[in-house]
Image (cartoon, grey):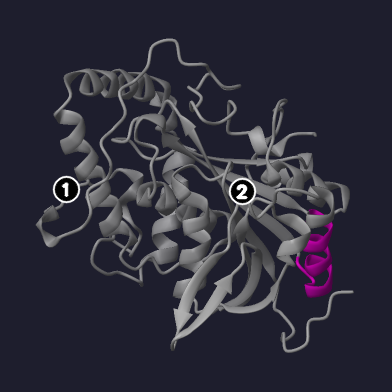
Amino acid sequence: MIELEGVPELVDPVMVAAFEGWNDAGDAASTAVAHLDREWKGEVFAALDAEDYYDFQVNRPTVWLEGGTRKITWPTTRLSVVRVGGEKPRDLVLIRGIEPSMRWRSYCNEILGFAHELGVGMVVILGALLGDTPHTRPVPVSGVTSDPDLARTMDLEETRYEGPTGIVGILQEACTHAGVPAVSLWAAVPHYVSQPPNPKATLALLNRLEDLLGLRIPLGELPEDARAWQLGVDQLAAEDSEVAEYVQTLEEARDTAELPEASGEAIAREFERYLRRRDVGGPGQAPGGHATESGDVPYLRDTSGGRTRPPKPQRPEKGRPKDAEGDAAPDDKPPAGPDEDASDD
């Protein structure tokens, strides 16, 4: 039985979840939820029992010292709540954890139990995948759902993916069967620079979440981090002619594919975003306070301030396996696609 003592009555709550591991290329999704929790000072109100869902030989606990006393942090999934202010205040229930090792159905049922008790109206699950996308262009973010009505009303794709899935796909389908509206947002991370962190992909997910929920998300230093990341990858790619040529090929393919995007609908969407954030402002943001992830301003920044440069891009490999959407699959993961974790498994 779920007990929620100390949790106030929530206002129009939405659950936002992300899981480290298979569904989290570049740690982009889990970092996005961590950003929301940090910026809005989330308060943890529950944690799932680690014994029920994790193999500790796969996800090992960590030992740390506090005042000379050794303590242990167990891998688990934690739930916190944040209040989003503004003209129409609402609450977000944030879920952040590691993809479980076992008992996925029980795991999802427990999360849905919290959603039911808290009166959650919609679940949004963030994910990130590796793909053939250039780091120099805006990060593609796909919004998918299994609900045809939700797809139509919220301008989302209705999933058609078939194949291996992760906890994101299982949770989304569990929500669908339980009658809870659920959406997955997927950011595509360049496979040749897949090591975390990837602040540009994290920023893209947060921007898409803003559009989906009509929120203003405080971005902090994330726009600056995204610029520094891109400049660092630019410099490292320029040192390897093979990688530079490969990136140029991806850029040409991306630019050709996106020519139809210069539409009235796309312009209207950007203008609505500007209006929503015009009173925020701040360094590292476009007019109106929106981060320049959209590509309107080049990512140029002096990295002499001591920020860590990203790892050297990996050389593209010939004959890489392709995913369900034609993207290159990572060597250490099953093939992935933007609809992947909305599987009908």
From this viewpoint, is residue 76 visible? yes
The residue shown at (23%, 54%) is: 308
Q: Depth check: 195 or 215 in front?
A: 195
Percent coordinates x, y for residue 296 in the rendering: 28, 45
Label 2 – label 1 distance at C-alpha: 40 Å
288 w.r.t. 230: above or below: below
Q: Quadrant of the N terminus?
A: bottom right
| Residue wearing tag 1 | 300
176 w.r.t. 118: above or below: above
The residue shown at (71%, 26%) is: 163
| Amino acid at circle 2 | Val
Q: Is residue 100 left or right of residue 324?
A: right
Report if residue 170 lies within the magenta region.
no
- N-term-proximal mark, 2 vs 1: 2
Helix, strand or loop status at disc 2: loop
Q: Which mark is residue 58?
A: 2
The residue shown at (22%, 48%) is: 309
